[in-house]
C-alpha cells in the first residue's frame, strides 16, 4: 500500500514538474491564410520555448470585436489578444483594461524594433501597450486582365476614375464592388474621400470629435460619394455581403474595382493573385497633398491576464525579426519590424506608395472614439442606402457627437 501511495505521489510530482505553462491567445485571424500562418508562428514559439503551451482561440472578426470587451472586463481573461493600434488600443488602456508591455523591450528601446512613427499609436501616457505585427496599405484593387481587355489605364484623377467606371458599366461590369454587411468597409471610403478632399489635419480633428458633422466640408465628402451612387457604380445589394463575399465579384471579373486593404490577397484564389494589382485612390483636389490609410495590427496583454509572464515571453517572440519576417513573407504584408524589408514586388509597390505619401491615418473606427465610430459607420450605411436623407443623417451624427464628447 505504501509503495502504491509513493508511486502515485511520484507521478503527481512528475506531472507537475513537466506540465507546460499555458499561454491563452484570443485571435481574430479567422481567414484561412492568416490563421494558418499564425498557427505556424505558435509552433515556432513552442519549439523555441518548450516549457510553454500556447492555446489559440480563434473567432470570426466581427464576433471578436463584440466579445473583446467581455473578456477584458471578466474576472480572468486571455493572456494575449489581437487588436488594432491607435484609438482602439488607447480606449482600453485609458480604462485600465490592458497592461503595459514595456517588458517586451527590456534592455532595449521600442525603436530598436519598430519605426519611431509607430510609438505614439502604440502607447498611452508614455507607456507601450501594443506590440505591432504588421501594417498594410489601402488601394483600389483591380484585375489587370480586365483593364487590359477594355483598354483601361489606372486613373490618376477623379474625372479619370469616373470615366473608368463608365467604361466598365457600358461593358456589363459592375464598376465598384463593396460589401457593407459590416460597416467598416464603408468607413474606408469615407476616410479616403475625406483625406482627398479635406486633408489629414481636418480628418484628425473630425475623428477627435472637434469638428461638427454638419460642417460643409463633411457634406462635401458625401456629395462626392453620392456621384457613385447616383450613377449606379456600386455593387447592388451590397449590404447583403461581407467584404470577402464582395471580393468574389472582383475575382470572377464581374466587378472592376474594389477599394480595400492589402489583405484582400488573403482571400484571393491562387489563379487570380498574379492578376491582381492596385492603384492609389485618385486625386480629387490637386491642392490637397496625398494622404493614405495604413492600419497597424498587433497584440495587447489584458490587465486581467492569468499568465502575464508567459504573455510577455510570447510578445517578445512576436516582436522578433524572425517572427515578423515569417508573418510578412507568408501573407505579403509589410512587417512592423524595422529590419524586415517588403517580401515581394506587390508589397514593395505598396511600401513605395506610402513612402511617397504626405501623411497617414489609421482608419475611421481606429482613430475615433469607439462609441462615435459605431454611430458614424451605421450612418454611412444609412447614407449608402438612402443618400437623399443626408441632411437628416448628418444632423443625427452631430447630435451623437455632442452627446459622446460632451459638447454643448
Image (cartoon, rainbow, N blue to C red):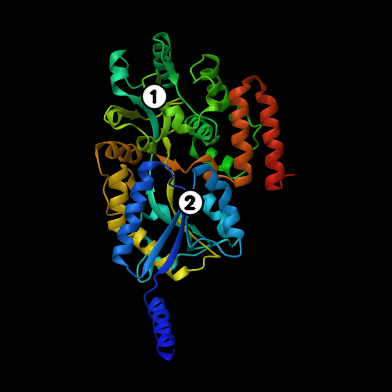
Secondary-structure class at tag 1: helix
Determine which residue is flagged by label 2: 83
Asked whether, in this view, residue 244 is left or right of residue 350, the answer is right
Q: How many marks?
A: 2
Q: Quadrant of the C terminus?
A: top right
**Residue 102 place in picture, x, y as percent:** 44, 66
**Residue 116 place in picture, x, y as percent:** 38, 55
| Quadrant of the rendered image containing residue 206 | top right
Q: Is residue 118 among what the camera can see? A: yes
Q: Which of pointers 2 and 1 lies earlier in the amino acid sequence?
A: 2
Determine which residue is flagged by label 1: 250
**Residue 373 place in picture, x, y as percent:** 59, 41
Q: Quadrant of the N terminus?
A: bottom left
Secondary-structure class at tag 2: strand
Q: Residue furthest front?
A: 1
Separation of disc 2 and disc 1 at Cα?
Answer: 28 Å
Q: Residue at x 67, y 41 (%)?
A: 401
Q: Residue at x 69, y 39 (%)?
A: 400
Asked whether, in this view, residue 83 is left or right of residue 342, the answer is right
**Residue 405 place in picture, x, y as percent:** 68, 47
Q: Residue furthest right?
A: 408
| Quadrant of the rendered image containing residue 97 | bottom right
Residue 8: give its label: none
Are circles 2 and 1 on residues that touch, CB within 8 Å? no
| Quadrant of the rendered image containing residue 382 | top right
How crowded is the residue under tag 1: few (<14 C-alpha within 10 Å), some, or many (20+)? many
The residue closer to the viewer here, 215 or 378, is: 378
Q: Residue furthest bottom?
A: 2
Q: Residue at x 54, y 22 (%)?
A: 237
Amino acid at each position: 500500500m505504501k509503495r502504491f501511495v509513493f508511486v502515485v505521489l511520484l507521478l503527481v510530482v512528475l506531472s507537475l514538474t513537466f506540465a507546460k505553462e499555458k499561454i491563452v491567445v484570443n485571435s481574430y485571424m479567422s481567414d484561412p491564410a492568416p490563421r494558418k500562418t499564425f498557427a505556424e508562428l505558435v509552433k515556432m514559439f513552442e519549439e523555441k520555448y518548450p516549457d510553454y503551451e500556447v492555446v489559440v482561440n480563434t473567432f470570426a472578426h466581427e464576433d471578436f470585436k463584440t466579445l473583446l470587451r467581455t473578456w477584458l472586463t471578466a474576472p480572468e481573461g486571455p493572456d494575449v489578444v489581437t487588436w488594432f493600434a491607435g484609438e482602439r488600443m488607447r480606449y482600453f488602456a485609458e480604462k485600465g483594461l490592458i497592461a503595459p508591455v514595456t517588458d517586451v523591450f527590456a534592455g532595449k528601446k521600442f525603436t530598436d524594433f519598430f519605426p519611431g512613427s509607430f510609438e505614439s499609436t502604440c502607447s498611452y501616457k508614455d507607456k507601450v501597450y501594443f506590440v505591432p505585427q504588421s501594417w498594410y496599405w489601402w488601394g483600389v484593387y483591380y484585375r489587370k486582365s480586365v483593364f487590359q481587355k477594355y483598354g483601361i489605364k489606372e486613373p490618376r484623377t477623379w474625372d479619370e476614375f469616373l470615366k473608368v467606371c463608365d467604361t466598365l458599366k457600358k461593358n456589363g461590369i459592375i464598376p465598384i464592388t463593396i460589401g457593407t454587411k459590416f460597416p467598416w468597409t464603408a468607413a474606408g471610403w469615407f476616410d479616403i474621400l475625406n483625406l482627398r478632399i479635406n486633408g489629414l489635419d481636418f480628418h484628425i480633428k473630425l475623428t477627435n470629435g472637434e469638428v461638427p458633422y454638419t460642417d460643409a466640408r463633411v457634406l462635401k465628402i458625401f456629395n462626392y460619394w453620392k456621384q457613385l451612387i447616383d450613377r449606379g457604380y456600386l455593387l447592388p445589394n451590397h449590404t447583403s455581403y461581407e467584404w470577402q463575399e464582395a471580393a468574389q465579384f472582383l475575382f470572377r471579373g464581374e466587378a472592376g474595382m474594389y477599394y480595400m486593404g492589402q489583405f484582400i490577397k488573403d482571400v484571393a484564389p491562387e489563379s487570380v493573385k498574379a492578376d491582381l494589382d492596385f492603384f492609389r485612390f485618385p486625386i480629387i483636389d490637386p491642392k490637397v497633398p496625398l494622404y493614405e490609410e495604413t492600419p497597424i495590427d498587433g497584440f495587447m496583454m489584458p490587465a486581467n491576464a492569468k499568465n502575464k509572464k508567459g504573455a510577455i515571453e510570447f510578445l517578445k517572440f512576436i516582436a522578433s525579426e524572425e517572427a515578423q519576417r515569417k508573418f510578412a513573407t507568408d501573407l505579403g504584408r509589410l512587417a512592423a519590424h524595422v529590419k524586415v524589408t517588403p517580401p515581394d514586388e506587390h508589397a514593395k509597390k505598396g511600401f513605395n506608395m506610402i513612402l511617397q505619401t504626405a501623411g497617414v491615418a489609421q482608419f475611421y473606427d481606429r482613430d475615433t472614439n469607439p462609441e462615435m465610430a459605431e454611430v458614424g459607420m451605421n450612418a454611412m450605411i444609412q447614407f449608402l442606402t438612402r443618400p437623399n436623407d443626408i441632411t437628416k443623417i448628418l444632423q443625427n451624427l452631430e447630435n451623437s457627437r455632442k452627446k459622446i464628447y460632451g459638447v454643448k
